[in-house]
């Protein structure tokens, strides 16, 4: 039997998120049903709910940093049992047989593209998918990961499902580690995870921020140096020195100020996805140092599990502020002012207990 879900949804780009209910599908043989305990608040939720990227489907129930407890499993599921603590990130399905899916790089599914946890066509029920700002979810087992952290850390684990994997994957791909100088630009939800992860991988980490009040804090997160990116002298001191820069900024900005900090053959990878394009970077900064600008979307399911295990082994969770779902609009407003250290996480008990 399909089940009724309680949620918060935006009905249009200009309406605040408000209570909403909808049907979740019945548990199929390869499905896992999850009682959602916490859901992180990603800037992508805000971009989508507000229609800042093309193609938002309304009503929109955001949320792709989901942790919770398994309440039921289908007959073919062997990896999970009722009672397990699990996570769901940005994807809930993909074709499963193209070369990218076979390589567990489902984020690059070549047949259908991956099915997003929210705002994607729902191939089972029709309509579109609804995310983690809801009381429960039913997900194919292949897209569920195991949480090995202690249960008391669960709220801080939720942001790993997007902010964690989106920074872990490029740091691994571009081989952050001992002997490498790595920059992380923008200390928000993604950026603060980038600092923690790059430091745990053994890189020399330099954080770039526009917020003076984050300087000391960034060192606590693991940065060896912190630079205010609006200070041209402090920026110039690092010219030509970085192997890799991870840029997480959620707004359009001047990329050249960071490109000149890369050494020969260095790469700056953009994971931020702002509403408006960046001004075109200078061709000279690229060709004179054979430098690259790259991009990277989330990460595959196997790598998400690897990242969660890495975080458990290194004692890493996100720095969070827990909110009831009724405060989501205030959280969005504060996120737009970079006024959060560093991720809001919704305690889903607030939704379940509401009348
Ligand atoms: P966030 O928590 O709002 O952090 C963004 C940070 O960017 C801010 O904390 C701020 O850092 C900096 N910033 C914001 N506005 C700025 C401006 N005008 N100029 C310079 N710096 C500015 O957002 P998030 O959740 O980390 O997400 C960051 C971006 O990544 C979003 O665009 C999101 O949609 C995208 N994203 C992409 C993927 C992917 O798969 N590639 C996955 C998740 C999210 P400081 O205060 O330190 O300057
Ligand atoms: Zn996200």
Image (cartoon, rainbow, N blue to C red):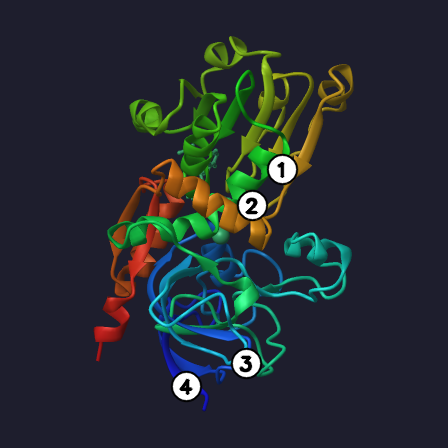
Q: Residue at (57%, 83%) from the top-left corner?
A: 125
Q: In the rendered image, which quarter is residue 66 located in?
A: bottom left
Alpha-carbon neighbours of circle 3 within 10 Å: few (<14), some, or many (≥20)?
few
Q: Nearer the viewer, mark 2 or mark 3?
A: 3
Q: Nearer the viewer, residue 325 or 166?
A: 166
Residue of label 3 = 29
**What secondary structure is marked by label 2?**
loop
Q: Earlier in the sequence, mark 3 or mark 1?
A: 3
Residue of label 4 = 3
Is residue 155 rendered to the left or right of residue 199?
Answer: left
Q: Earlier in the sequence, mark 3 or mark 4?
A: 4
Alpha-carbon neighbours of circle 2 within 10 Å: few (<14), some, or many (≥20)?
some
Q: Nearer the viewer, mark 2 or mark 4?
A: 4
**What secondary structure is marked by label 4?**
strand
Q: Are marks 3 and 1 in contact (CB under 8 Å)?
A: no
Q: Earlier in the sequence, mark 2 or mark 4?
A: 4
Residue of label 1 = 278
- Ligand 1 within 8 Å of disc 2? The answer is yes
Q: Nearer the viewer, mark 3 or mark 4?
A: 3
Task: Report, in whole angstroms, how far the alpha carbon at label 3 lies from the one at label 4.
Answer: 16 Å
**What secondary structure is marked by label 3?**
loop
Q: Are marks 2 and 3 in contact (CB under 8 Å)?
A: no
Q: Spot the residue most to the front.
A: 78
Q: Are marks 1 and 2 in contact (CB under 8 Å)?
A: yes
Q: Is residue 185 above or below residue 250?
A: above
Q: Position of residue 47 (x, y in %)?
A: 50, 55
Task: Report, in whole angstroms, how far the alpha carbon at label 1 lies from the one at label 2.
Answer: 8 Å
Task: Report, in whole angstroms, how far the alpha carbon at label 1 lies from the one at label 4.
Answer: 43 Å
Q: Is residue 45 above or below residue 268?
A: below
Residue of label 2 = 274
Q: Position of residue 39 (x, y in %)?
A: 37, 59
């Amino acid at each position: 039997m399909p089940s009724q879900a309680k949620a918060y949804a935006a009905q249009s780009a200009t309406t605040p998120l408000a209570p909403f209910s909808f049907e979740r599908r019945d548990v199929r043989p390869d499905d896992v049903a999850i009682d959602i305990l916490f859901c992180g608040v990603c800037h992508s939720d805000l971009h989508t709910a507000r229609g800042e990227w093309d193609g938002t489907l309304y009503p929109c129930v955001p949320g792709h940093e989901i942790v919770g407890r398994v309440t039921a499993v289908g007959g073919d599921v062997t990896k999970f049992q009722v009672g397990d603590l699990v996570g769901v990130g940005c994807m809930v399905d993909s074709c499963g047989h193209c070369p990218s899916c076979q390589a567990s790089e489902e984020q690059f599914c070549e047949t259908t593209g991956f099915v997003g946890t929210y705002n994607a066509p729902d191939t089972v029920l029709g309509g579109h998918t609804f995310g983690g700002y809801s009381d429960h979810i039913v997900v194919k087992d292949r897209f569920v990961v195991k949480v090995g952290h202690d249960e008391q850390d669960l709220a801080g684990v939720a942001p790993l499902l997007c902010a964690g994997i989106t920074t872990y994957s490029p740091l691994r791909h571009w081989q952050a580690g001992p002997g490498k100088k790595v920059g992380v630009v923008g200390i928000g939800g993604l950026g603060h995870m980038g600092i923690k992860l790059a430091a745990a991988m053994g890189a020399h980490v330099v954080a770039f921020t526009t917020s003076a009040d984050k300087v000391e804090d960034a060192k606590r997160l693991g940065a060896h140096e912190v630079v205010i990116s609006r200070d041209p002298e402090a920026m110039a001191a690092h010219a030509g020195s970085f192997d890799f820069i991870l840029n997480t900024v959620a707004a359009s900005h001047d990329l050249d100020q960071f490109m000149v900090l890369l050494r020969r053959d260095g790469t700056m990878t953009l994971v931020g996805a702002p509403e408006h394009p960046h001004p075109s970077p200078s061709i000279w900064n690229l060709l004179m140092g054979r430098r690259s600008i790259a991009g990277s979307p989330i990460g595959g399911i196997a790598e998400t599990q690897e990242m969660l295990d890495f975080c458990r082994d290194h004692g890493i969770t996100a720095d969070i502020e827990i909110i009831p779902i009724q405060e989501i609009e205030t959280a969005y407003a504060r996120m737009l002012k970079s006024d959060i250290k560093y991720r809001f996480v919704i305690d889903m008990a607030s939704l379940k207990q509401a009348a």
